[in-house]
Image (cartoon, rainbow, N blue to C red):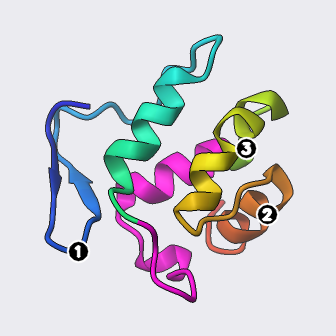
Amino acid sequence: MSGCRTDPGGSASCGRACPARIVWDYYGSRTRRAIEALFLAPQPHPTPRYADLTAAQQQLLGDLAGHRHAWLIRSSADRLRHLGLPHTQEALQSFAGAHRTA
């Protein structure tokens, strides 16, 4: 994810070089790389509100929440759990869905 900049708090914000959406791949490796690029360290407890995440972080979690293939989330669940983030599709939908606009 070239073009991503990180701040001292461990979050990342993306400039023009970052894609608006992840291009999903069969093995989920792009998703895991995006999670690692956007969430550099575990989130504080309690997890920040969705609205307090960067736009890129919101986009990633929102895209995962709405993805039609549950295996993609399962393949990234350990990383999401380690970061203190929702790690099931239902939890991601609840976390992101309450804050997304139609």
Question: Identity of the amino acid at label 2?
Answer: Ala
Q: Which numbered tag is attached to residue 91?
A: 2
Residue 81 placement, left or right of 8: right
Of the numbered discs 2 and 3, the one sitting upstream in the chain is: 3
Determine whether, in the image, residue 49 is placed left or right of residue 41: right
Question: Could you say whether the residue bearing mark 1 is in a helix, strand or loop?
Answer: loop
Over which residues does the magenta segment extend? 42-64
- In the displayed structure, 46 sits above or below 56; it is below
Q: Position of residue 102 (x, y in %)?
A: 66, 60
Q: What whole-number distance in Å separates the C-alpha atoms at marks 1 and 2?
A: 24 Å
Q: Mark 1 or 2 closer to N-term?
A: 1
Q: Residue at x 15, y 66 (%)?
A: 7
Q: Position of residue 28 (x, y in %)?
A: 60, 23
Q: Which residue is mark 1?
A: 9
Name the secondary structure under disc 3.
Answer: helix
The residue mark sitting in front, 1 or 2, is 1
Q: Residue at x 77, y 38 (%)?
A: 74
Q: How many marks?
A: 3
The residue at which mark 3 appears reads as 66
Local crowd at mark 3 within 10 Å, few (<14), some, or many (≥20)? some
**Residue 15 occupies which quadrant of the picture?**
top left
